[in-house]
Image (tube, grey):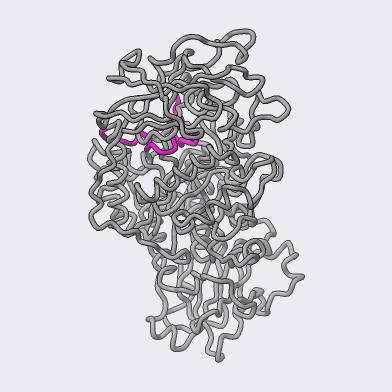
Amino acid sequence: MNFAVASEGASSVELVLFDGPNDPEPSHTVALTARTGPVWHVYLPGIRPGQLYGYRAYGPYEPSRGHRFNPNKVLLDPYAKAIGRTLRWDDRLYGYRVGDPEEDLSFDPRSSAPCAPLGAVVDDAFDWADDRPPQVPWEDTVIYETHVKGLTKLHPEVPEALRGTYLGVACEPVLDHLRKLGVTAVELMPVHAAVQDRRLLERGLQNYWGYNTLAFFAPDPRFSASGGIGAVREFKAMVRALHAAGFEVILDVVYNHTGEGDHRGPTLSLRGLDNRAYYQLDPQNPRFYRDVTGTGNTLNVGHPLALRLVLDSLRYWVAEMHVDGFRFDLAPALGRERGAVEFTSAFFRAVREDPVLSRVKLIAEPWDLGQDGYQVGRFPHPWAEWNDRYRDAVRRFWCRGEPNASELAARLVGSPDLYRAGGRSPWASVNYVTSHDGFTLEDLVSYLHKHNEANGEDNRDGPDANFSTNCGAEGPTADPTVIRCRERLKRCLMATLLLSWGTPMLLGGDELSRTQRGNNNAYCQDNELSWYDWRLDRRRRAFMEFVRKLLAFRRAHPVFRRRSFPEEKEVRWWHPSGREIVPEDWHDPNLCAFGLWLSATDDPYLVLLNAGDFCHFTLPEAPHGEGWTWVWSTAPVPLGRKGQILKTARLPARTVAVLRAAGDGSRRTGGRSRIR
């Protein structure tokens, strides 16, 4: 085995080997006497898979100059492919004396060997058989955002030993559910091995989401049925099973910061290897970190060592673990080399030019917490972006009844104001109404206010602007009127999402009407508040069937899956009075119903949206004067009989309806199709 680690500032580096996870000190210490540029390395014969190891780095401990070398601290290999021992919180993990009046300027001489996280040597061999990535075109992609543990922890048909694990996701009952649902890609919340926050553990909580990366190559052992190096094999088995079932695998990755925190955090890996190289430091006072992530530190991706670490990690997950794409948390932070966000930075250039990475799906969370951090619509091709302007426009229209029809109209047709420039396509807009961060769909129509008391932060955490509604009662209720209102709104929200141009993303569990009881920041809730409840009553089962049919409808009609922006004449907007909308109409505060005519094919469709009370909609003249036939709607009763030619539509309150131009197209496909 060749052991190698990169550090520019270290004066020497040692490899330490442990015989077992309970060993308080290493059994062998080996000096890395060979050096190639900044890379220290040594080759050892006879090393076997499962060998536990770490490093010690020697150098100056001068926090005021950005140096934090402390050879008493055992450091996790940034390239470790498996975690052989998770960290055990102890004051010895810190490079300074905790409680000292000088804080991090002091020096702690105690060894962290008994409690430090350790890497484990792995055998990369795996039988991929005839594994082939599905390579779903962007315009056909439907993303299902989910959590490895939450998806399967309560699934009654998954073997108990596999619930909450990679192998649980690979079980046939889970794959069958995803197949029937009709999604094409599974986006997994962070699976890189993460740090469990000490403050959360002390409060009896855990970092469930995992946005606190420690090791960029190692699958998180939390989700392994066998633990240790078994996590690598199990992750590969999960990917192989998802591919065989036709699903792409997208990873939510966190390269903007690490779990080592700010200047008062522990010394676990990069901080002790070369703090100045791997982290962005305050140029005025290098003792402190430049923090645009809200976590205490920002990775210095503009430095060659950190950039290579990130790129090598991404290539590893594609080439060795066979994943199909990435969603980058706080992606603008990766382009900050001199403080400002630059899309010509080393990271974005390298990804664009890389023959492996440029071919997988790349999705940005297009904001961070730094100056000018909001970059929605500004990422270059071939990046797609989470479009929070879509999310807010849809929520405000349906849940709050706000006069934002003009904003919503732009979001329905792929947000051309954001993505048409630079040769980008509608699919660059990842449309979503809900995500892991915020209310679930069920809670969006059940709570007017967040209820995060269980997080132990006095309900101060989580966003306050949710654009939600409770339909007249806060939280659970037996009132049938309130329940009917909520079910109608859920259908309108989901229908809007799946009829919009762009790449739709569903929050996993929304199809099951999953609730977090009003918690819109359940990052620390590793319990039934976050896990999916698979027990479906009649109401929840009916909504799941609605989502399935809606996805099938989208899949069957390419007019709702545009690869490129259409000509202006192919999209027309209609007023309920039966005329085309003029610019002044969009400023009408009472405009809560309008129609979208899609004639980009020979089979025109008319989509009607009514967020207000009952609306009598005079339909425009259809092609060839043949009128319109009702296809489906979210209303509890049909808008017309099978094959009936409609000149007007009576839209109940809170309704989405789809009509098709009468003629050969509608007769050929059998008229309407009920989606209820």
Q: Which quarter of the rendered picture does the C terminus lie within? A: bottom left
Tell me if I can see residue 313 in this picture.
yes
| 560 relative to 669, above or below | above
- The stretch of residues the image draws in magenta is 205-226
Return the x and y of residue 663 as percentages of the image width and height.
46, 88
Residue at 56% across / 69% down in the picture? 651
Return the x and y of residue 470 as percentages of the image width and height.
56, 46
Position of 188 with respect to 609 (left or right) is left
Q: Residue 514 occupies which quadrant of the picture? A: top left
Residue at 42% across / 69% down in the picture? 553
Position of 309 with respect to 407 (left or right) is left
Residue at 37% across / 42% down in the picture? 148
| 48 relative to 604, above or below | above
Q: Is residue 219 magenta?
A: yes
Q: Nearer the viewer, residue 559 or 258?
A: 258
Q: Residue 84 occupies which quadrant of the picture? A: top left
